[in-house]
Amino acid sequence: MKKSGIRMMAGLCVIALAVLAYGCPKPTAEMQRAEGAIRDAKAAGAAQHAPSELSSAENSLSEGRDMMDKWRYKNARAKFEESYRQALNAKQKALAAQQETPGEPPPTVVVVRPPSDVTTHTVVKGECLWWIAEYGHIYNDPFQWPLIYWENKEQIDREARRHGNTTNLEDWIYPGQKFAVPQDKSLDEVKKARKRAGAPAPYTPPGY
């Protein structure tokens, strides 16, 4: 009876974990994305020029892996996205530091600005504002995501609260939402958005 009871409890635990994970797919792509960003940051010299940012990215990645192993997929996804942002920040800081180093030529950054007729985007499953802003046909720069949030703030906040969220409302977007993508913002407005998103100073986007 005791062994049977133990087996039954183990089965119930497995079912409970499956219920918790249901509807939240394993964030393998997000993990690989963060790993790639960390590799890029290291290649750009982040270990020398942005060690604290690189360390934060690696720690977030490690925490995300631990959460994924425990089937806490939603929390793991958030950690992987945080790791990706930190790695990208580390890379940009490293490149900026090398630009300021006497005798070293600045790295060449080529960015294609989005076409002026890209004015809307419909959210698909798994996207966040950071990813949307990073698309080449949107801004090709994830740090400009606040421009989309500010333009669609009323809709985003309302839908987030409808789903029971009360903090960090910009993090909660849902498939099927259609956002306006502003293309007429001044350089000062773009710099303001990049500062809000945590980009390194002086907040001037690549390509300007």
Image (cartoon, helix red, strand yellow):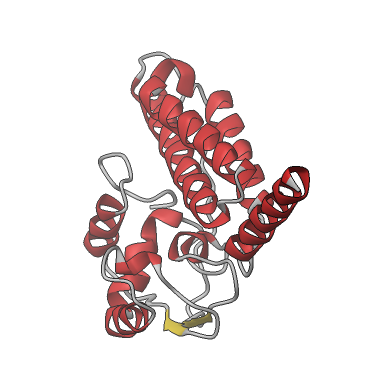
**Spot occupied by residue 122 in the image (x, y as percentages of width and height):** 54, 82
Which residue is at the front of the view, 98 or 162? 162
**Spot occupied by residue 20 in the image (x, y as percentages of width and height):** 58, 62
**Spot occupied by residue 89 in the image (x, y as percentages of width and height):** 41, 38
Which residue is at the front of the view, 81 or 188? 81
Q: Is residue 207 above or below residue 200?
A: below
- Does the image show residue 106? no
**Spot occupied by residue 119 in the image (x, y as percentages of width and height):** 46, 82
In the picture provided, is 133 more to the left or to the right than 136?
Answer: left
Which residue is at the front of the view, 34 or 108? 34
Q: Is residue 172 above or below residue 122?
A: above
In the picture provided, is 131 more to the left or to the right than 194?
Answer: right
Residue furthest to the front in view is: 1
- Does the image show residue 159? yes
Looking at the image, how many numbered discs can be counted on the residues? 0
Q: Residue at x 26, y 40 (%)?
A: 201
Q: Residue at x 35, y 84 (%)?
A: 162
Q: Residue at x 33, y 23 (%)?
A: 100
Q: Is residue 13 above or below residue 199?
A: below
Q: Quadrant of residue 164?
A: bottom left
Q: Quadrant of residue 56?
A: top left
